Amino acid sequence: MEYTAVDSTREYLARLETGADWRGEIEALARTEEIEAGWFNAMGAVQDAEIWFYDQDEQEYGSVTFDEPLEVAACVGNVSTLDDDVFAHTHAVLSRRDGETLAGHLESATVFAGEVHLRAFAEPLVRQPDDRTGLDLWLNES
Amino acid sequence: MEYTAVDSTREYLARLETGADWRGEIEALARTEEIEAGWFNAMGAVQDAEIWFYDQDEQEYGSVTFDEPLEVAACVGNVSTLDDDVFAHTHAVLSRRDGETLAGHLESATVFAGEVHLRAFAEPLVRQPDDRTGLDLWLNES
Amino acid sequence: MEYTAVDSTREYLARLETGADWRGEIEALARTEEIEAGWFNAMGAVQDAEIWFYDQDEQEYGSVTFDEPLEVAACVGNVSTLDDDVFAHTHAVLSRRDGETLAGHLESATVFAGEVHLRAFAEPLVRQPDDRTGLDLWLNES
């Protein structure tokens, strides 16, 4: 395991814009506030969603799209930099009218309403390719 | 997107009372400590649950009730004021014995056991009607 | 309801080791940093998972095992001490390729990739048997 202590700089509450992209909104906040590392929680509802699942053997993402209104029952993610740009790694748990649940890596989703808490850290968090998983990870072994 | 930086005042850990209402307990903590804005995470188990799903076209909530023991696999929410009273906007992911999952806006649930982390903010957070969604939202465009 | 205000000491970001046990990694971080109380959020993917469900009537845990790759869509938990050892009470929401979701009390899981935010508190948090639920809970009524 690799880990680091971090110092929080500021924290934010955000209301995501109806019709905008869920992840794009979080990245826009990070860019505006020059946040290169952070942790967030969010909740709300979306008008559609594209979820990714990582194939651990093939080492590539597959995608599934849901073109329907969904609650965002829980959303957990973090902000880091990837290829010199801000990246909000976002996972979400979505639900239908009857409580049926869908979840995974949230690539994109059209915001209906979104409430976010973001905590920014002083130390940059940089993603780099990890050979073992094929993913871009932070705190890689040096 | 609307957002604001917030300053944390205090943070709390709570053990919810067996037999009490899950959301009511969180609101009781907020009232006792005079918290008008906060963010929380919780986990535990409930004896039953009423989940709401917002119909984005009709702009009204529908309800579904589960009268059975469920784990609270994840619970994310925030504290704000609505019509001058404390409101804990609560989403939850619940699960059954075989891992099957149910999720959505948690209107009410009878606590079996509940563990909560609540972070309080100095700045008040006030919900007001939002025309576009029909919801009561905070950080509305002025 | 029982609750307490807590003071945060330090906070950490961790990258869990591929092939290690998910919960064991979080407990290892707590032991190394001498953390006896904390709250965490995590996300990532696992190679398998054992989920527990608490039977509220029989007051005993049942177990279900998933021997397949799963996303960790959300993971919420807390660190306390139980029988003088560190215990990371861990709940998780897992998902399959098509978005299908499984959730519950995460007993064990083999890490594929894991990203964790842990907030440590100054005040110890001790689990003791609770007669009403049969669980080991913290902040018990004295």
Image (spheres, coloured by chain):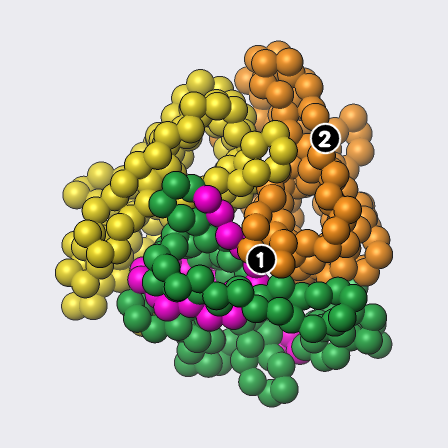
Chain colours: A orange, B green, C yellow
- What residue lies at 61% left-to-right and 29% top-to-bottom? C97
**Residue at x 62%, y 58% (from the top left corner):** A97
- Mark nearer the viewer, 1 or 2: 1
Image: magenta residue range = B100-126
Determine if the magenta segment contains residue B110. yes
Nearer the observer, C30 or A27: A27
Can you give x and y, in whole percent of width and height, for residue B133 in the image? 78, 69
Under mark 2, the amino acid is Ser
> Few, some or many C-alpha atoms within 10 Å of disc 1 (few <14, some 14-19, many ≥20)?
some
Q: Is residue A58 magenta?
A: no
Mark 2: give few (<14), some (14-19) or many (20+) Cα within 10 Å: some
The disc, 1 or 2, on the residue closer to the chain's N-terminal end is 2
x and y, in percent, of residue A49 in the image: 74, 45
Q: Cα distance, mark 1 to mark 2?
A: 24 Å
Secondary structure category for the residue under label 1: loop
Residue A63: which numbered mark, if any?
2
Residue B27, percent from left and from top: 47, 75
Q: Quadrant of the C terminus of chain C?
A: bottom left
Placement of B85 over or under A65, stated as above or below: below
Q: Which residue is mark 1?
A: A98
Asked whether the viewer can see residue C137, the reply is: no
> In the image, B73: left or right of B3?
left
Q: Is residue B9 above or below residue A53?
A: below
Q: Main secondary structure of the magenta part?
A: strand
Query: Which element type, helix, strand or loop, lies under badge 2?
Result: strand
Chain letter of disc 1? A
Name the chain under label 2.
A
| B107 relative position to A34: left or right | left
The disc labelled 1 sits on which kind of residue?
Answer: Asp
Q: Are marks 1 and 2 on the same chain?
A: yes
